[in-house]
Image: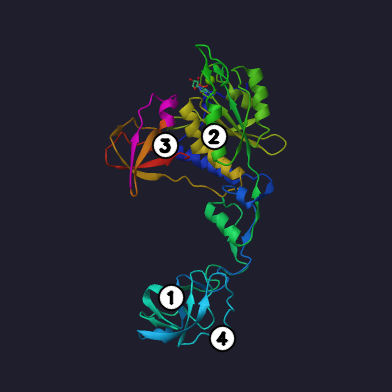
Amino acid sequence: MYSITHSEQVVLSFKEARHTVEQHAAGVQPIEKETVTLLAAVNRVLAEEIHADRDLPPFPRATRDGFAVRAEGVSRVPATLEVAGEIRAGDSPEKYEYSVDASHAIEIMTGAPVPRGADAVVMVEYTRRAGSRVEIQRSVKSAENVVPQAAECRAGQLLLSPGTRLSPAALGLAASVGKAQVQVYQKPRVAILSTGDEIIDVDKQPAANQIRNSNTYSLAGQLQAAGAVPVPLAIAPDRLEPLRALVHEGLNSDLLLISGGVSMGKYDLVEQVLSESGAEFYFTGAQIQPGKPVVFGRVGGRGTPTYFFGLPGNPVSTMVCFELFARAMIDALSGAGPTPMQFLQARLKSDVRTKTGLTRFLPAMLSGEFGEVEVELVRWQGSGDMVSTARANCYLVIPPDRERIAEGEMVAVLRTQA
Ligand code: AMP
Ligand code: MG
C-alpha cells in the first residue's frame, strides 16, 4: 500500500536534517529573472553581475575640510603658504590649470577633487587663515586625508555577483555605478496548505470544538519576510479525497508547505497522500522540540520536481520548522547562495532544565544592549502556545546533550525575524 510503514520512518538529528535540506537546496534552480527598479530591489536576490562603470572614487577625493597642499611644503611647521583659490565638492578636478606647488595651498572642502600637484589635505583645525595666506600648524604625510582615484574599485571591476541578496549597502553601491534597474530572480511562490478537521477560516465563528487557522497566517508572514510569495490554499479536512486535490494544487507552486497531519495519528494522512503522488521522503522526523514529526521530500512529476515540507500543526512547531528547514529551500529557490545557520550568543538569565536527546528551540526573550545580550525563556504551555510565542523575540537553542544550563552561561540563540 501507499502509506509509509513504521520501518520506513527516517528520523534524523537536527544537524543531519538541516544538512539534508541544504544538500537538496544546493541542487535547486532559481526561478526566472525579472527586472525591477532599484528602489524595489531591497532584499531581492541579484541575477546579474554588477560592474563598476567608472573608477571609485572617480577622482582623488578630499576626506576633510582644509587645505590641499604638497606634503613636502609643510614638512616643517608652522609653514605659511599662499592660498591660490578654493575648490569645493562638485568643482572640476581641472578647475586649476596649474599644478599646486610646495609654496601654495588651495582651500578644499570634503568630497572635492584634490587639485593637481597637491598630494594631501591639512585639516582646517590645524590652520590659521590670514588674508591671502594660510599658516599650516601641522605636517601631513603624502596621501593623508585623500582617497586616491580608484582606491575603492577600478572601472570594469565586478562589484556584486548573482546570488547576492541586496542589502541597503548593496543598493547604494548599485546606485553609485548607475544601475537604476537591476535584474533579480523572481520570488518563489510557496503554497500553504493547512490541514485538520477542526481547523476553520479566520473569518468564521468557531464552535467550541473548532480551532481557527493561525498557521496559514504565521507562515505567510514568515514567507514574505523570507522574500517569497505566499499562496494560501483552502483548509484541507483529514479525508483522503479533498486532501489529495489540495496537495496536487499545492504541488503546482515552487514549494509546498503543509501544516498538520504528519504525526502518527489515524487521521494524519499527509504522508499517505504524498506517497500516492510518488513522493520521495528524505526525512520523516527530526530529533527536535518543537517540531519532531517534520517531513521533507520531493514529488518528481514530469516537469521540475517540487519539494515539500510537512510541518507539524502545533503553531510553534510550524514556525520553528519553517525557520530551521523551509527557509533554506526558499533561499535556494530565490537564487540566493547557501545560507549557513548562524546563532547569536547570549548570556542565560536563569537556569534551564530539560531532558537530553532532542535539540530544543524554545521561545525566549532577548534583552540587554550593546555587548551585553541576555536571554530568558518565556513561560509557555508547549508547542501550541502562540500567546507566549508572539511575545518572544527569539528561540533559545538547547543542545541534545544538556540537561541543565546554568544562569550566566553563554547560550546559542536563533533570532526570529523582526
Ligand atoms: P496536527 O499536527 O495535525 O496533529 O496538529 C497538532 C495541533 O496543532 C492540533 O492541536 C491542531 O489543532 C493544531 N493545528 C493544526 N493546524 C493548525 C492551524 N492551521 N492553525 C492552528 N492550529 C493548528
Ligand atoms: Mg491535524
> Cα distance, mark 2 to mark 4?
62 Å
Q: Along the line of sight, which residue is nearer the eye, 201 or 122?
A: 122
Q: Which residue is situated farthest in the top direction here?
A: 208
Q: Which residue is mark 1?
A: 144
Q: Is residue 160 magenta?
A: no
Q: Which residue is mark 4?
A: 98
Q: Earlier in the sequence, mark 3 or mark 1?
A: 1
Left or right of 100, for residue 306 = right
Q: Earlier in the sequence, mark 2 or mark 4?
A: 4
Is residue 296 in view? yes
Q: Which residue is mark 2?
A: 221
Q: Which residue is situated farthest in the front direction here?
A: 131
Which is more foreground, mark 3 or mark 1? 1
Residue drawn at x 54%, y 85% as measured from the top left: 99
Q: Amino acid at mark 1?
A: Glu
Other-residue count near label 4 (Cα within 10 Å), few / some / many at <14 / 14–19 / ≥20: few
Report the magenta residues as a range: 372-390
> Cα distance, mark 3 to mark 4?
62 Å
The picture places residue 166, in percent across and down from the top left corner, at 57, 51
Q: Earlier in the sequence, mark 4 or mark 1?
A: 4
Q: Along the line of sight, which residue is nearer the eye, 135 or 237?
A: 135
Q: Amino acid at mark 2?
A: Gly
Residue drawn at x 51%, y 77% as measured from the top left: 86
